[in-house]
C-alpha cells in the first residue's frame, strides 16, 4: 500500500523540553494521531491504540520546523490494523527534509463495550499519489 501524508504540524515553543528541542512525547502523540487518520481510511469505526513498536529518535526537531507524518497500512486484520508512520522534519532554516523517526502502530476496532469487534473495510477509491520530492 502506498504511503501518504496524513498530518503536518508546525512545532511551537509550548512543545519543547528542558533542552529547547521538541519533547519526544509530543512527537509520539502526533504519531498516534497520524496512525488514527490512516486507520479511519480503512474502517470507519472506533479505533484504539494497543501497541507501538520501538521508536528511535534520529534527529532533534526544533521550534518552527514543519513535521510531516507519512502513513501506510502494513497489515489489515479482522479486528486490527497495523500502520507504519514515518516522520520527517522540514527545517525552518533552508527547508531541508530530515528523517526523524518511524514506528509501527497496532490499532484495534472496538465496540461500545470497548471489546474488539470486526471492522468493515472502506473502499476509499484510488488515493492521490504523494508529490515527488525535490
Image (spheres, helix red, strand yellow):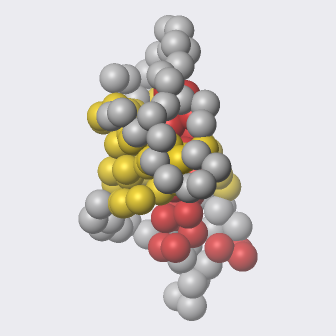
Identify the residue at horizontal 37%, vertical 50% (top origin): 106
Q: Position of residue 10 (x, y in %)?
A: 67, 55
The mark total stands at: 0
Judged from this view, the residue extending furthest toward the bottom is 18
Judged from this view, the residue extending furthest toward the top is 126
Taking depth in this image into account, of 27 and 98 the one nearest to the observer is 27
Q: Which quadrant holds the C terminus?
A: top left
Q: Which quadrant holds the N terminus?
A: top left
Direction from residue 127 to residue 2 in the image, left or right: left
Vertical relation: 43 (above or below) 71: above
Vertical relation: 100 (above or below) 70: below
Q: Position of residue 72 (x, y in %)?
A: 39, 33
Direction from residue 97 to residue 92 in the image, left or right: right
Quarter assignment of residue 45: top right
Quarter assignment of residue 74: top left
Q: Position of residue 130 (x, y in %)?
A: 48, 22
Taking depth in this image into account, of 12 and 45 the one nearest to the observer is 45
Taking depth in this image into account, of 32 and 50 the one nearest to the observer is 50
Q: Position of residue 37 (x, y in %)?
A: 57, 39
Identify the residue at horizontal 61%, vertical 31% (top origin): 44
Identify the residue at horizontal 65%, vertical 73% (top origin): 15
Vertical relation: 53 (above or below) 3: below
Judged from this view, the residue extending furthest toward the front is 113
Q: Is residue 127 visible?
A: yes
Identify the residue at horizontal 45%, vertical 34% (top origin): 118
Q: Is residue 86 visible?
A: no
Vertical relation: 56 (above or below) 90: below
Taking depth in this image into account, of 130 and 123 the one nearest to the observer is 123
Amino acid at each position: 500500500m502506498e504511503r501518504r501524508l496524513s498530518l503536518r504540524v508546525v512545532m511551537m515553543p509550548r512543545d519543547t523540553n528542558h533542552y529547547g528541542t521538541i519533547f519526544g512525547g509530543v512527537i509520539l502523540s502526533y504519531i498516534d494521531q497520524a496512525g488514527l487518520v490512516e486507520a479511519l481510511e480503512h474502517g470507519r469505526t472506533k479505533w484504539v491504540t494497543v501497541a507501538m513498536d520501538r521508536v528511535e529518535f534520529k534527529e532533534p526537531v526544533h521550534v518552527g520546523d514543519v513535521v510531516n507524518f507519512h502513513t501506510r497500512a502494513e497489515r489489515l486484520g479482522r479486528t486490527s490494523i497495523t500502520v507504519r508512520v514515518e516522520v520527517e522534519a522540514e527545517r525552518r532554516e533552508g527547508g531541508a527534509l530530515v528523517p526523524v523517526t518511524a514506528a509501527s502502530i497496532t490499532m484495534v476496532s472496538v465496540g461500545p463495550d470497548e471489546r474488539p469487534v470486526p471492522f468493515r473495510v472502506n473502499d476509499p477509491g484510488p488515493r492521490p499519489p504523494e508529490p515527488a520530492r525535490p
